[in-house]
Image (cartoon, grey):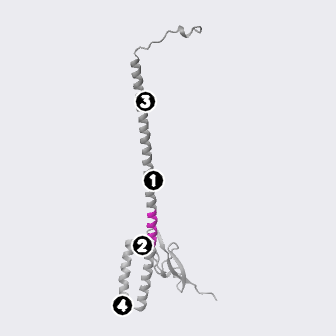
């Protein structure tokens, strides 16, 4: 076979070339459609990716806006709580003045205002910290600012008076109650 020359080979005759060309055309058409489908899929995926990225960015912006609004609400809430405490202090000072002056109209108006503020405090969830005379101060809720000498040994360390009322809102402590406690010095041995 190696000694043969090209002239020794018989020419190949193709029979039914129309069918082969039509197979080729069909295959070419199929490949062309697959290519177009791939391009369409690629374009669709690219558009979908862009939409997803856009939605993620919108969501991120919404989250940032919500976070900023939350911070504003927290700040406003803190200002409101401080403002309510200041109003309570002003009203307590007016009540002391009314009791000191003993003007009946002022005492009556002050008691009405105190009831209104108590209702507002209740609606806001603001609760006055109990600091009853002769009760034991609690370091979590009371700040001892001074002492008052007593001759009653059983009153030693107990609350004598409240200088400033304390408040809490739920579990949040807004302000400690400033209290003066009794101090028993006892009799000294001679």
Q: Quadrant of residue 59?
A: bottom left
Specify the label residue 57 is tagged with: 1
For label 4, the crowd category at 10 Å Cα-Cα, with few meaning under 14, some 14 to 19 and many 20 or more, is few
**Label 1, label 2: how far apart the Cα atoms are:** 40 Å
Q: Residue 15's spot in the image, x, y percent?
A: 41, 14
For label 2, the crowd category at 10 Å Cα-Cα, with few meaning under 14, some 14 to 19 and many 20 or more, is many
> What residue lies at 44% left-to-right and 70% top-to-bottom?
76
Answer whether residue 26 is magenta in the image.
no
Secondary-structure class at tag 2: strand
Q: Residue 159's spot in the image, x, y percent?
A: 50, 80
Left or right of 4? Residue 116 is: left
* Nearer-N-terminus badge (1/3): 3
| On-image quarter of the C terminus | bottom right
**Label 1, label 4: how far apart the Cα atoms are:** 66 Å
Q: Nearer the viewer, residue 2 or 62?
A: 2
Say which residue label 4 marks.
Answer: 104
Q: Nearer the viewer, residue 182 or 26?
A: 26
Say which residue label 3 marks.
Answer: 31
Instruction: Select label 3 or label 2 by which is in front.
Output: 3
Instruction: Select label 1 or label 3 by which is in front.
Output: 3
For label 3, the crowd category at 10 Å Cα-Cα, with few meaning under 14, some 14 to 19 and many 20 or more, is few
Specify the label residue 126 is tagged with: 2
Q: Nearer the viewer, residue 136 or 52?
A: 52
Q: Which residues are magenta?
A: 68-79
């Amino acid at each position: 076979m190696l000694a043969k020359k090209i002239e020794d080979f018989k020419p190949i005759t193709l029979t039914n070339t129309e069918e082969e060309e039509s197979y080729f055309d069909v295959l070419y058409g199929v490949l062309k459609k697959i290519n177009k489908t791939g391009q369409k899929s690629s374009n669709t995926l690219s558009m979908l990716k862009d939409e997803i990225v856009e939605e993620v960015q919108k969501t991120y912006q919404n989250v940032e806006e919500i976070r900023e609004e939350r911070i504003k609400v927290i700040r406003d809430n803190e200002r409101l709580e401080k403002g309510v405490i200041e109003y309570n202090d002003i009203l307590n000072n007016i009540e002391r003045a009314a009791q000191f002056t003993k003007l009946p109209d002022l005492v009556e108006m002050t008691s009405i205002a105190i009831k209104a503020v108590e209702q507002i405090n209740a609606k806001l969830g603001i609760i006055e910290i109990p600091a009853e005379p002769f009760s034991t101060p609690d370091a979590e809720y009371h700040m001892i600012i001074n002492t008052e000498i007593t001759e009653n040994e059983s009153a030693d360390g107990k609350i004598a008076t409240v200088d400033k009322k304390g408040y809490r809102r739920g579990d949040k402590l807004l302000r400690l109650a400033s209290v003066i406690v009794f101090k028993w010095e006892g009799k000294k041995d001679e």
